[in-house]
Image: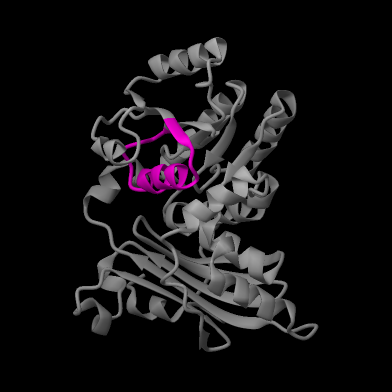
Amino acid sequence: MNNFALIGAAGYIAPRHMKAIKDTNNQLVAALDTNDSVGIIDSYFPDADFFTEFERFDRHIDKLSRINNGRAIDFVSICSPNYLHDSHMRFALRSGADAICEKPLVLNPWNIDGLLEIERESGRKINTILQLRLHPSILALRNKVANSGAGKKFDVDLTYITSRGHWYLQSWKGDDKKSGGIATNIGVHFYDMLHYVFGNLQENKVHYSSATKAAGYLEYEKARVRWFLSIDSNDIPEDIRISGQRTYRSITADGESVEFSGGFTDLHTQSYEQILQGHGFGLEQNRIAIETVAHIRTAERSSLTGDYHPFLNNIKR
């Protein structure tokens, strides 16, 4: 049994990590969050120590490593705000633990280089959650692409709309310096998936970017991709929106739909199983996706000519 610590226990994604730790028969020993609305811990690990101040959490983790009475930390799971991931991974490795970090791993590609150095110095490893690489529908698409003819490029449309209320822009997620913006915060695992399925990135254009939505064009070795991301419920197609649905996911490849709406429930547990077997996704496997979102964040808008996502026709620019 491995002992885990968790940084960022009050957020949306933390329960998936708690469940994964429990499902893999491991133990959450300590958790940290500046917000104390963390009653969900009782559903998984009621005996876990909890801290709202990093300094006390740091001291506790250090004490456990020194006492080494079977409660030293083996892994630190990181679900904190995006801009803190880099620092918290460094803390994990310097504490003698491996890290399991939520997406996005970091905000800028050069941060990966510094983390690689700390991995070498500490002898510990950073793992990340790239759950779409484990999704059966994505794996089937990857196999189809791998078996397509030489020179074949798929025409792909990626649309992801996940409605958020007014709170979103008032939180750290609405601050590009902390979240990386819409493309980074809600899209980075899609860009990783596109690279994983279709090969190296060749072109990256941004057609639209605002606080609530973004769209552009990506070309890979094996695909031409029009993408659209949004947290605005008004962007959901009307026939779906009137039914009360607040999320819309769609990937089509050469006009054929890739069904991936289901199958997400256990992907974090599967990710943990892979990590515990020594097969987790590491730093370098994140580089292309992080380079992609970093470029999207700073790129000038391209004119709406050629391939652009059709949802942009409904947006005033």
Q: Residue furthest bottom?
A: 255
244 lies above or below 36: below
Q: Is residue 12 magenta?
A: yes
**Image x and y of residue 254, in percent:** 58, 87
Q: Who is closer to the viewer here, 218 or 236?
A: 236
Residue range highlighted in magenta? 7-28
**Residue 247 part of the magenta-drawn span:** no
Rendered view: 70 above or below 107: above
Please tell me which residue lies in front, 238 or 309. Answer: 238
Quick check: 167 left or right of 212? left
- Give residue 6's position: percent from left, percent from top: 43, 33
What residue is rendered at 64% in x and 64% in y? Answer: 195
Q: Residue at x 36, y 45 (%)?
A: 15
Q: Quadrant of the C terminus?
A: bottom left
Residue 86: image location, x then y, percent: 55, 34
Q: Residue at x 45, y 12 (%)?
A: 59
The answer to whether residue 160 of the structure is visible from this angle is yes
Relative placement, left or right, of 136 versus 311 is right
Q: Picture coordinates of residue 14 (x, y %)?
A: 38, 43
In this picture, residue 28 sits left or right of residue 288: left
Asked if residue 61 is positioned above or below residue 251 in the image, the reply reads: above
Q: Which part of the image, by quadrant, shows the N terminus?
A: top right
The quarter holding residue 60 reads: top left
Q: Is residue 308 above or below residue 107?
A: below
Residue 129 visible? The answer is no
Q: Residue furthest right?
A: 150
Give me the residue at 45% from left, 68% from top: 263
